[in-house]
Image: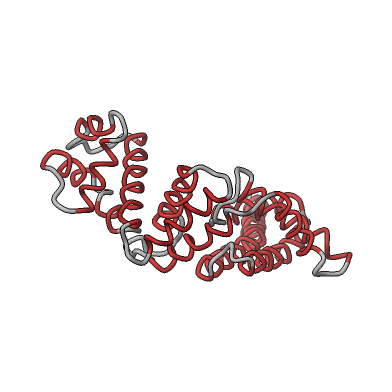
Amino acid sequence: MHPLMRRFLDLSKVTDALEQGPGDDDARALVAAIEADGKLKQQALASKGKQIVPNDLQQRLIIASTKAATQRVSADPTLGPKVRAAIDAVVAAGGAEDEGLSLVYQSVLDEGFGWLEDPEDFDATFLGETLDALVPLATVDTDAVEAWVDAFVKQVDGPQRPLRLAVAESLLEAAWSDGPQPVAAEHVDDAMDSLARSVASNELEQAGAVLVEFLRFLHEKKLIGATRLARLTEIAKAAALAPEQGDGEEEEGDDEDGAGDEEE
């Protein structure tokens, strides 16, 4: 998680910056983001000292801190040019600058909250990979997606193709139904949930393996960075095994219940 976001998860530090005035670049960026969001400043100050902060306020403050962190990332000598390249790629593909900036916001938020990795650490390398991937993602269109899926399916013989197609479509529906974006942990989970409902239980582990192959395929297209690929691979493999393990636990519980009934 970016240090600015981690620091201002604490509402008292947010209100201090708003009341006393920002004392450094991170605080200045946060105050500017809050002041640009209508009545957010007033609502944040009104919640000072309260033990329970309304969920809506918490979410709006996280969005503001994400925008502020993005502003600080944009000023970074290493990450800043990657931010500019990502936005320029979206604009060159016919999108608006705000669309490109929205994808950058999403990438900063994803780095901070989207993974099991320690949020105390800011993984600049991972964020840099994600920003790099936004450039080719900006050029993705329906024709490209159809060609990729076709190529991926045809990498295997006929009998194996239906599962390959189902896996590719499940992930793309989960990740890109609202437009191309970095594939996230939740997208892999959603794809595996969909596959669990559509394929036989004894094929689910194989479906997970095929999903990993498709993630690698997208990595070769530079749409997924190496670190993201490694994280998503772990999630896909765990999700493919989870239903099987859950079934085993349920059967064990059923046996115990049955045994108890007999004793009675």
| Residue at position x 76%, y 62% in the image | 203
x and y, in percent, of residue 102 in the image: 46, 45
- Nearest to the observer: residue 35 or residue 190: 35
Residue 46 in sight in this render: yes
x and y, in percent, of residue 37 in the image: 32, 34
Residue 263 in sight in this render: no
x and y, in percent, of residue 138 in the image: 57, 53
Residue 79 sits in which quadrant? bottom left
Q: Is residue 221 left or right of residue 152?
A: left
User: Which quarter of the rendered picture does the N terminus lie within?
Assistant: bottom left
Q: Is residue 28 left or right of residue 119?
A: left
Residue pushed farthest right?
A: 158
Residue pushed farthest front?
A: 92
Residue 237 sits in which quadrant? bottom right
* Above or below 137: residue 213: below
Its colouring scheme is secondary structure
Residue 19 sits in which quadrant? top left
x and y, in percent, of residue 216 in the image: 64, 69
| Residue at position x 21%, y 47% in the image | 28
- Nearest to the observer: residue 245 or residue 222: 222
| Residue at position x 55%, y 51% in the image | 92
* Above or below 111: residue 61: above
Numbered circles on residues, count: 0
* Above or below 90: residue 246: below
| Residue at position x 26%, y 46% in the image | 30
- Nearest to the observer: residue 225 or residue 174: 225
Q: Is residue 134 left or right of residue 174?
A: left
Q: Is residue 3 left or right of residue 98?
A: left
- Nearest to the observer: residue 123 or residue 105: 105
* Above or below 238: residue 34: above
